[in-house]
């Protein structure tokens, strides 16, 4: 049985789930707690793809397809509450026709709601809203949904090792052989052998690849999010305009999560939260739901997206949110090393499927992907399995 090593405790959980179902022996390493990076720190939107349809139709279609699958395999991790795109001025209103047309091209259903119906659904909307378009957005719990993948992977035999930092990749010539690992709980360093290594470290994937002399077209793209200490909307509220900053409100339990800003950086370990971004996000989101400014801030935080940046000078809000899976044997002459780039929490299952298909191709197996049909175990089951997480 081939041994697969996964680096990264975010989307890596979905990769571990896919590969264990295919019969591989899987060991996953995360340098800190599971989901302590980007995957566990986003605002929790299960994308319909509508936000991306006007400028990134491939990402929009990916999100829609995964939205439908996740509703079936992990309903316990979602609130299937839909979303509204609302127009606040004439410029937003003029954008509506293009928005609807592009959603239709991506296969995303839209419903133009009469304003009285929109206000009945969302009483806290600004009184001056000019139009509202409903889309099949939903709310996910950023931590719990991803833990459903970890729970199912562990139930099926994956070896999950948090607080275990990969400090080096062991190779013999151009063939990777395993990883050197530092266990931060015991302070022990050891080598774990493996036939294939999957670099699923999100915005840290570039650092992992650089240890083998590989440059990835990847940029960490931090963004600030703010949570307000009251839930003000039933569903997700988006601004009906081209993708920008401070244009989404995501209800999470008793909170309202506001997002987000975006800029490009070089090192996800050195990102700091700019205080001015917090006020800007609140002010922009309050144009859609005015009561936000009357309520206390519950928390503010920053997380880095792993964006694929192939050209210099790209506007960060317009960079594609699609993903890629690179076989470095073909790209760089390094056999047994694979990198997963880009993507979103919404598309982590699809990213895992792509990686699993590539592992199959490299090992000569024909085991099909089954993650689109296997219902995920509840996240609490992760802790029920006999024996500690190593």
Image (spheres, rainbow, N blue to C red):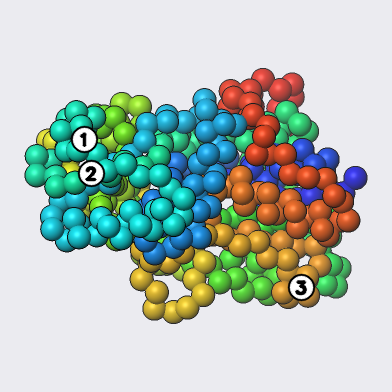
How many numbered callouts?
A: 3
Asked if labels 1 and 2 touch by Cβ distance under 8 angstroms, the answer is yes
Residue at x-position 37% and y-position 31%: 81
Residue at x-position 38% and y-position 58%: 102
Image coords of residue 118 (percent x, y): 21, 35
133 on left or right of 155: left
Residue at x-position 13% and y-position 55%: 89
Q: Residues within 10 Å of mark 2 (few under 14, many from 20)?
A: many
Callout 1: SS: helix
Q: Relative to residue 337, is residue 108 depicted above or below?
A: above
Q: Relative to residue 276, is residue 124 depicted above or below?
A: above
Q: CA distance from mark 2 to mark 1?
A: 7 Å
Q: Residues within 10 Å of mark 1 (few under 14, many from 20)?
A: some
Image coords of residue 208 (percent x, y): 64, 63
Quadrant in the rendering for residue 184: top right
Foreground label between 1 and 3: 1
97 on left or right of 145: left
What mark, if any, has residue 132 been given in the picture? 2
Location of mark 1 (residue): 118
């Amino acid at each position: 049985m081939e041994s697969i090593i996964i680096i990264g405790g975010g989307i890596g959980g979905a990769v571990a789930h896919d590969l264990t179902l295919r019969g591989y022996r899987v060991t996953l390493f995360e340098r800190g707690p599971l989901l302590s990076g980007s995957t566990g720190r986003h605002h929790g939107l299960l994308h319909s793809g509508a936000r991306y349809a006007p400028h990134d139709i491939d990402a929009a279609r990916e999100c829609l397809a995964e939205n439908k699958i996740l509703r079936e395999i992990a309903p316990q991790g979602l609130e299937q509450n839909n979303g509204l795109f609302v127009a606040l001025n004439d410029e937003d209103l003029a954008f509506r026709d293009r928005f609807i047309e592009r959603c239709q091209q991506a296969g995303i259903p839209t419903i133009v709601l009469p304003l009285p119906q929109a206000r009945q659904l969302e009483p806290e909307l600004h009184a001056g809203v000019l139009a509202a378009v409903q889309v099949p957005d939903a709310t996910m719990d950023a931590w719990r949904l991803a833990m459903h993948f970890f729970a199912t992977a562990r139930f099926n035999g994956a070896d999950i090792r948090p607080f275990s930092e990969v400090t080096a990749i062991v190779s013999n010539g151009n063939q990777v052989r395993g990883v050197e690992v530092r266990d931060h709980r015991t302070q022990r360093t050891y080598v774990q052998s493996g036939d294939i290594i999957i670099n699923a470290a999100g915005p840290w994937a570039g650092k992992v690849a650089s240890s083998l002399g590989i440059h990835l077209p990847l940029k960490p793209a931090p963004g600030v999010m703010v949570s307000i200490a009251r839930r003000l909307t039933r569903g997700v509220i988006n601004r009906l305009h081209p993708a920008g900053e401070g244009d989404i409100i995501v209800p999470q339990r008793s909170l309202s999560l506001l997002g987000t800003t975006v800029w490009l950086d070089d090192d996800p370990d050195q990102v700091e939260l700019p205080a001015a971004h917090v006020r800007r996000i609140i002010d922009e989101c309050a144009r859609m739901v005015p009561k936000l400014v009357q309520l206390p801030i519950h928390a503010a935080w920053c997380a880095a997206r792993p964006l694929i940046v192939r050209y210099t000078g790209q506007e960060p809000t317009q960079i594609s949110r699609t993903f890629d899976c690179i076989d470095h044997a073909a790209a760089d002459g390094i056999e047994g090393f694979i990198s997963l780039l880009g993507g979103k929490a919404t598309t982590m299952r699809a990213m895992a499927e792509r990686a699993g298909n590539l592992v199959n191709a490299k090992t000569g197996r024909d085991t099909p992907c089954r993650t689109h049909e296997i219902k995920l175990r509840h996240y609490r089951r992760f802790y029920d399995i006999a024996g500690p997480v190593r």
